[in-house]
Amino acid sequence: MSSAPIPADVGAAAAAAPTIATRLASFAHGLRLDDVPAEVRARARHLMLDAIGCAMAARGEPFAGRFADAVADLAGTGHGGRAGVVGFAARLPIRDAALLNGVLMHGLDYDDTHMAGIVHLTVSVLPTLLALGGQRGASGADALVAYIAALESGARIAAAARGGFHSQGFHPTGVVGALASAIGAGRLLGLAPLALARAQGITLSMASGSLQFLEDGAWTKRMHPGWAAQAAISAATIAQHDIPAPLAAYEGRFGLYRLYLGAGHERADVSLATAGLADGAGEATWELTQIAVKPYAICHFSHAVADAAVALHARGIDPARIRSVEARLPAGTMPVVAEPAAAKRRPTSDYDAKFSAHYAVASGLLRGRLGLRELAADAFTDPAALALMDRVTCTVDAATTFPRHYSGEVIATLDDGSTLGERQAVNRGHAERPLSDAEVRDKFLANATLHFREAHARAVCDAVLAIERAPSLRALEDLLAVAP
């Protein structure tokens, strides 16, 4: 199909006015793997591995099968698709495969988080690159550098909002994840800088993600990263065909920050969206090193109080003697994991339990753990857990350094009036208190062997950690697209 030529002055005028999108596009286009420190490349590979392990663990969950059926209906092509999905032998059209991979990687809420941006990036970016890269035969090195460029960009885009997306009811993973993934997709497609900038402008009309699921434990949050990946693939492909698009996608009159932050856009710091880029404009910083790997499959906001409760259990606290519990959390996290208190004390689904600080504390105090088993219905409806949740009250942690750290404190008052307390100023998994690469591999193997043979899990581990030496992503995609 032919189209009318684009006036020459459109691209020239746009390119003459630097914006956040053009800065990020220039960075992504110019980044070379040799520019990235070895330790950053290694961590990137481990973040990829962690997300794939989460997807393999999710393969046996009820939501995996039901979303798979829905996506198959959307695809409408039976077995005629072209991209693989983690844990499924049937292949799908690339956007549908990206959608389902995003659901799997994020579905257990066990995936990584950029602390300052409060955003899960790998689970939208990696499905985008697996689908596109597998179809195009991209090398592992090409995929890795596109992944790093996308995460570096997305972390900055999210951090610039200074936590404002949540207060407006938007899930940054769906919104920012789409923009970051478009940058990664554009880099993998070899887009020129102007087209890369346009891809972000196109994505602005597609980015979405509502927090309404918090009201009733609905499953829609699980869709956000995959939907972001779909949007990214669409936007980058459209931009590849010289479609003019807004270049002030972030700071414009109807750009990301004014549109999605409302009156709160005045508290945003748009300078953070391009600060420290490795583009030769100043000293480079690597935001990828600020991405935390989760030790618990629950909302990251509750990790510190969960750890504090587990520590109190280890110190020998007797749950039967607990009269009341105060759980201190950052003010900005309260609407997500602590309010309304009555609902948080009575989770009705695993997703409710994942977003209940009351349950995280009760499980930690009662059992000394909060693994996948503790997110089953018989665990969060256990009468002992319910009784303890009734004694938990969440209050604001005045000493927090949120959003830099997701801090927390638990203070238990016993039946004799004495108190026992435990504070976690820096949540475990944070860059300042990270899970080691060995711990990430252990987490992957624990997740991957829930439904798959250990030999297969180790083969996947080896392939992901050697991704930059892979001549093509197709071998990895084929390895992942195997049913349990």
Image (spheres, rainbow, N blue to C red):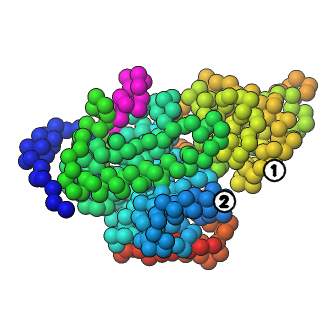
Instruction: Please report the residue visible at 71 percent of the width from the left and 46 percent of the height from the top.
Output: 349
> Which comes before the other along the chain, label 2 or label 1?
2
- Give the percent coordinates (x, y) of residue 213: 59, 40
- Give the percent coordinates (x, y) of residue 334: 62, 29
Instruction: Please report the residue visible at 71 percent of the width from the left and 52 percent of the height from the top.
Output: 371
Magenta residues span: 256-273
Does the magenta run of residues contain 296?
Answer: no
In the shown orientation, is residue 473 left or right of residue 306?
Answer: left
Q: Which residue is more in the foreground, 155 or 78?
A: 78
- Inter-mark Cα distance, 2 to 1: 16 Å
- Give the percent coordinates (x, y) of residue 102: 50, 56
In the shown orientation, is residue 424 left or right of residue 17?
Answer: right
**Image: 440 above or below 459:** above
Which residue is disc 2 drawn over?
Answer: 61
Residue type of the residue flagged with mark 1: Asp
Does residue 139 appear in this view? no
Instruction: Please report the residue visible at 57 percent of the width from the left and 69 percent of the height from the top.
Output: 87
In the structure shown, which secondary structural element does the residue marked by tag 1 occupy? helix
Which residue is disc 1 drawn over?
Answer: 378
In the shown orientation, is residue 148 left or right of residue 32?
Answer: right
Dot 2: few (<14), some (14–19), or many (≥20) neighbours within 10 Å? few
